[in-house]
Image (tube, grey):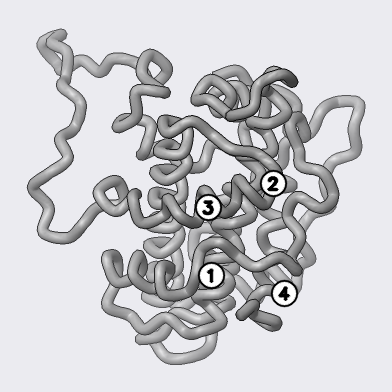
Amino acid sequence: MTTQHAGAGRSDPQSTSVTSESPFKPPLVKAVFRDVTPMHVSRSAAWAAASVTRTVLTEIVQGARAAAAEDRRKLIPGDLLSAIDRNVELEVGTTWYDHSPTFRGLTGVVYDAEGVVVPSRGRGGSRRPSAVVGAHRFEAGVRKLLRSRGTAAVPAMVRDLDGIASVFLTDLARDAAMVVREGGVKRFGSVVQAMPDEPAPAPFPKDFLGALSARSGDGRTIGRDDILAATTMRLFGGLRQRALTEAREAAQNPSG
């Protein structure tokens, strides 16, 4: 996909308001985490993870709205492709791409050593539900988020948003569990997207990065700071900054 201006398709100031109720509830978050790790997930961690997922999906929806034709009432999968193509920060659910017809032709054909096309991966065989198998759990939240943004989507687009949300939250859970196991972020990198005529985003404060490199607490519980650390690993650019800010507030002042 072509990397465009990182701010293209960026949401309006109210698009990711931290005061709005998250469409992804803590029980759903904890169910996803249970598929990944036996660790306990604290209440604040569940709210933070729900907030990060909401921020990511909201940015995708807003990007798709910006790409959609003005006279069209519902978003279509082509709008999703355009949004991701315009803003590389939104490319967060790549595991889903192998399972969705929307992305067929963009992920490329894989050949083995003999030059034979490798079939796409199957959907069965695992004892635990994968992120793809469990994607249907996010449909209600996706539809609620679409309504809150004043839009709707065709069923195929809703399915793609389901899948991306499931894959993203599953990846976030794995990263958070790794942070707990390793006692902090041991492999941290920063990627900054900026155009030559624009100032670069402000870097993370040194004390923030230092806090990520070591953690306190037991090795059996995923806490809010573990979710924040996982977010720094999973996202980048302005999307990461917004997700971190909103997750902190959501964990301190949970809705409902």
Q: Which residue is drawn at 50% across and 75% down?
A: 46
| Viewer-side residue, 192 vs 231 | 231
Q: Is residue 89 above or below residue 181?
A: above
Secondary structure at badge 3 equals helix
Which numbered disc flags the more N-terminal residue, 2 or 1? 2
Residue 234, numbered circle: 3
Q: Which amino acid does label 2 sit on?
A: Arg
Q: What residue type is labelled 3?
A: Arg
Per the model, the C-alpha gap separating discs 1 and 3 is: 10 Å
Q: In this view, does 124 lie above or below 140?
A: above
Per the model, the C-alpha gap separating discs 4 and 2 is: 21 Å
| Viewer-side residue, 48 vs 149 | 149
Q: Where is residue 59 in the image (x, y as percent from the top left)?
A: 66, 44
Q: What residue type is labelled 1?
A: Ile
Category of crowding for the residue at label 3, using alpha-carbon neighbours closer than 10 angstroms: few (below 14), some (14–19), many (at least 20): some
Q: Which of marks 3 and 4 is in front?
A: 4
Q: Do the residues labelled 1 and 4 touch (CB within 8 Å)?
A: no
Which numbered disc flags the more N-terminal residue, 2 or 3? 2
Category of crowding for the residue at label 1, using alpha-carbon neighbours closer than 10 angstroms: few (below 14), some (14–19), many (at least 20): many
Q: Do the residues labelled 2 and 3 touch (CB within 8 Å)?
A: no
Q: Which residue is drawn at 69% across and 46% down?
A: 149
Which numbered disc flags the more N-terminal residue, 1 or 4? 1
- The part of the image, by quadrant, that contains residue 23 is bottom right
Q: In this view, does 142 lie to the left or right of 70?
A: left
- The residue under label 2 is 149
Per the model, the C-alpha gap separating discs 1 and 4 is: 13 Å
Secondary structure at badge 2 equals loop
Q: In this view, does 145 lie above or below 212?
A: above
Residue 227, numbered circle: 1
How many marks are shown on the rendered structure?
4
Per the model, the C-alpha gap separating discs 3 and 4 is: 19 Å
Secondary structure at badge 4 equals helix
